[in-house]
Image (cartoon, helix red, strand yellow):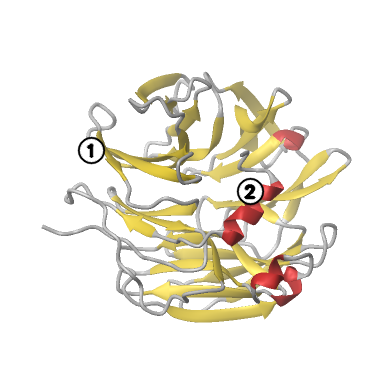
Amino acid sequence: MNRNHPCYRLLLYCLTFVGAAACSSNSSSWQLVTGEGLPLTGFHAEATLFINDSTGLVLGSILPDAGGLGSDFRAGQVATLFRTTNGGRNWQKTTGDSGSRFVLTTKAGPVVFAVQLQESDAQRDSSRLLRSVDQGRSWQPIGVLPHQITSLSFADSTQGFALTNHYEHGLRLIYHTTDGGRQWQRAALPLSDRASWGLHTPDGTSWLLLTSPGSPYYSTHLAKINWATSAATVEVIPQGRVDKAVASDSAGNLWLASDDPAGTIQLLRRDQHTGRYSRIHSFGLSQGQPLLAEALHVSGCSITLLASYSDTTVALNTYHAYHSTDTGRSWQEEELPIASKVSPAAFTGPEKAWLFAGGNTFQVCFPARK
């Protein structure tokens, strides 16, 4: 099933198995660890973020009950955030407004941002932005944008942009801030009808992934944004079928995981200086199942790629982790002990990653130590 289909979103609310995992090259396998304080039922996670190896956040909403999956579930849900300070062993809960849910979180240095979606109907949704400077212990509201924010990225504590799901005159609304989210300016980008996801790299460069009419669910082009002039330089991504598995390294190079039509994943690197793309590695399963890139993380010489394939025997996804410690020259592969749909992965340092699956319960996973 297409990951953007409305029925697929509904399926996420109905899953009964939830897991999370973390890995390290110092560990021989991924392990599952239950987190005390996470609810057994009713919580739907939509975003995860680990600020460091100890402190992490899981954001989403408490759903009212099974009947809440009907047309009126929005009014009954409550925005909910869980926070851990001991690597996922114990969690503390913070609740927000009813009729809302947390949908996104990101960080820029020590500053953490979150998006709380206030849902009324498709035309009147609004996104409340929150900011934390104490690792998610307390939050300060910093503004409200109309409609749902679908992508949020900050280069630092001041510069960022937000992509919304609303169109006016055929263009998707995009906002830009230079003061940490207190004030937002609407960007008049002529290509925003094709924008699907964005990344603000630490050097201040902004990138948008663009779809094409022939590939509405994958991005085939990349746009570099100049916010001062609202101009964009657009280029074709070679073998481009990119969803959201994009990362940048400290040198400003972009890394993209592209889902090849043949069922493999092509890991590409875009050189910051020349703009040229290099294919670093190709990933595939010996059984022939088509792989989909879920998340990508690059830190120093370390690269982690999380991928999934649909297991028709259990009607769920099975996950594989690929890890390199030498900038992609050699790889280790592991199949993860979870089978479900995960929310975005959280990464800390060069080698650790936390994965959370959607459903009614949480299991926090992190690496065994030798």
Which picture quadrant has residue 122? Answer: bottom right
Residue 203 image position (x, y, % from top left): 47, 43
In the rendered image, which quarter contains the C terminus? Answer: bottom left
Residue 84 image position (x, y, % from top left): 38, 74
Asked if labels 1 and 2 touch by Cβ distance under 8 angstroms, the answer is no
Residue 249 image position (x, y, % from top left): 38, 39
**Residue found 38% across the figure and 59% down from its top:** 20
Q: Is residue 340 above or below residue 327?
A: below
Q: Is residue 199 above or below residue 132?
A: above
Q: Amino acid at mark 2?
A: Tyr
**Residue found 55% across the figure and 43% down from its top:** 199
Residue situated in front as seen by the camera: 42 or 201: 42
Instruction: Give the residue number, with chain letter if any, for mark 2.
Output: 8
Mark 1 surroundings within 10 Å by alpha-carbon count, few (fewer than 14), some (14 through 19), many (20 or more):
some
Q: Is residue 156 left or right of residue 236?
A: left
For the question of whether residue 270 can be seen, the reply is no
Q: Secondary structure at mark 1?
A: loop
**Residue found 54% across the figure and 59% down from its top:** 15
Instruction: Give the residue number, with chain letter if any, for mark 1.
Output: 325
**Residue found 28% across the figure and 32% down from its top:** 327
Residue situated in front as seen by the camera: 313 or 249: 313
Q: Earlier in the sequence, mark 2 or mark 1?
A: 2
Q: CA distance from mark 2 to mark 1?
A: 35 Å
Q: Is residue 108 above or below residue 165?
A: below
Which picture quadrant has residue 190? Answer: top right
In the rendered image, which quarter contains the N terminus? Answer: top right
Q: Is residue 179 left or right of residue 293?
A: right
**Residue sticking out furthest to the front:** 313
Q: Amino acid at mark 1?
A: Thr
